[in-house]
Image: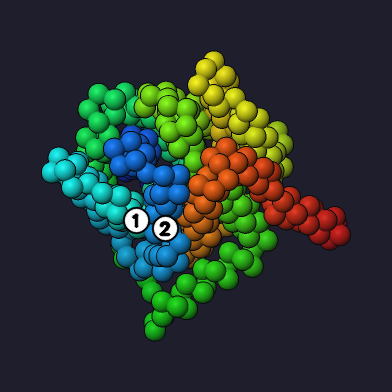
Amino acid sequence: MTTTSLDSPPRRALFRLPDFRRLWIGDTVSQAGTAVTVLALPLVAIGPLDASPFEAGLLVMCEYLGFLLLGLPAGAWVDRMRRRRVMIVGDLGRAALLATLPLAAWLGVLTLPQLYAVAFGLSVCTAFFDIAYQSHLPQLVDEERLVEANVALEATRTVTAAGGPGAGGALVAAVTAPVALAVDAVSFLVSALLLSRIRRPDPRPARAPGARLREEIAEGLRFVFRDRLLRALTLTAAVSNLCGTIGTSMLLVLLAGDLGLSPFLCGLVFTAEAVGGFLGSLLVTRISARLGEARAMCASVVAAAVLWLLALPFFHADGRYAVACLLQGLGWTAFMTFRINSVALRQRRSPAPLLGRVTATFRFVVWGCMPLGALAGGVLGEYAGVRTALWTGAVGELLAVVPLLVAVRGGAGRDRGEG
């Protein structure tokens, strides 16, 4: 007689686990709507509201500001709360915020300050959702399946993102960007409904008697920065996000503003990135097995940076744009090895009671760099030119591998010394 336990052989196929399947479908629906917002939100600013490069950079900054301001306490709070409930509330909050934009547009009162406020609110909800989401996943699958589960989630995220921006561009052209944002609001409602149907118990995490918020936050920080590999992963991702956001905050300003491309054509570069990311997610296990996890991640970061750098000269309103999209997509194919392995490695190396705070520390440092990068990109775009901002970000991406490379070589040296 067989049991239904996750740990008992023979193991059930990953997608036959009902709770994981509900999490996967809910996340997929949410990501499909978010793929529309990636294009629609800045197009509202650049188009109807006539935002300058600096104002567009401020919008991107607001989209990530929640991670910088609330990232650390959010992790400690999530470790005190039922994680599935946090995700559901986060979805409902994002749906409500996005719904205000088409309403304001219909009433003729939509302004840039409202866009900034909604973008900031979305970043706060997303900060809580993502921390709870990554902390809840190990409760739904066993440790040996974490990489498989993360691959499945990242692959489907990129599949939905592959069609999302292109479809979003067509949707924006057909019904206007504010109405397209209403589609995303509905997607968050559907995601919340699916998450509410997960049946696996979601108990409130146990707390140490007398534990204080500041002490819990400090514990997560110490754990990450005392672990050689976790520290390197965090710094590498932080440099990559900082420099990457300098450029990406100005990408739509270049495409929709300077080059005058249609919303559909603007969406194609994001579609290319998503398709490349999907292909890269399928290769993660094979690449890691051949090169080893650490070397594979180093190669991933370097290859991605070089490909993104090569893409920049091809961003023009002619046939060269197809080459730029192709190179951008290949950059994401390369980068997925680092992205997926770093998440799985962080989940494996973190004790369950600390996982929310470890995730929050990572998000605080890594995502907290993004509003700073967006602000720098806006300033560079306004005063030095949009292309200068793009080049600055791409060149900076080459430096991202340094912390990881130092950690890998240092670890190998210690291993040889001990041997």
Marking on residue 65: 2
Q: CA distance from mark 2 to mark 1?
A: 6 Å
Display coloring: rainbow
Q: Is residue 275 above or below residue 417?
A: above
For the residues bearing labels 2 and 1, Cβ distance under 8 angstroms? yes
Residue 342: percent from the left, percent from the top? 57, 48
Q: Quadrant of the N terminus?
A: top left
Q: Is residue 405 left or right of 349 when viewed as pictured? A: right
Q: Is residue 160 left or right of 255 when viewed as pictured? A: left
Q: Is residue 47 above or below residue 7?
A: above
Q: Nearer the viewer, residue 253 or 293?
A: 253
Q: In the image, what residue occupies the spot 45% across and 44% down?
A: 53
Amino acid identity at mark 2? Leu
Residue tagged 1: 120
Give the residue furthest to the bottom.
210
Q: Is residue 159 above or below residue 100?
A: above
Marking on residue 44: none
Q: Quadrant of the C terminus?
A: bottom right
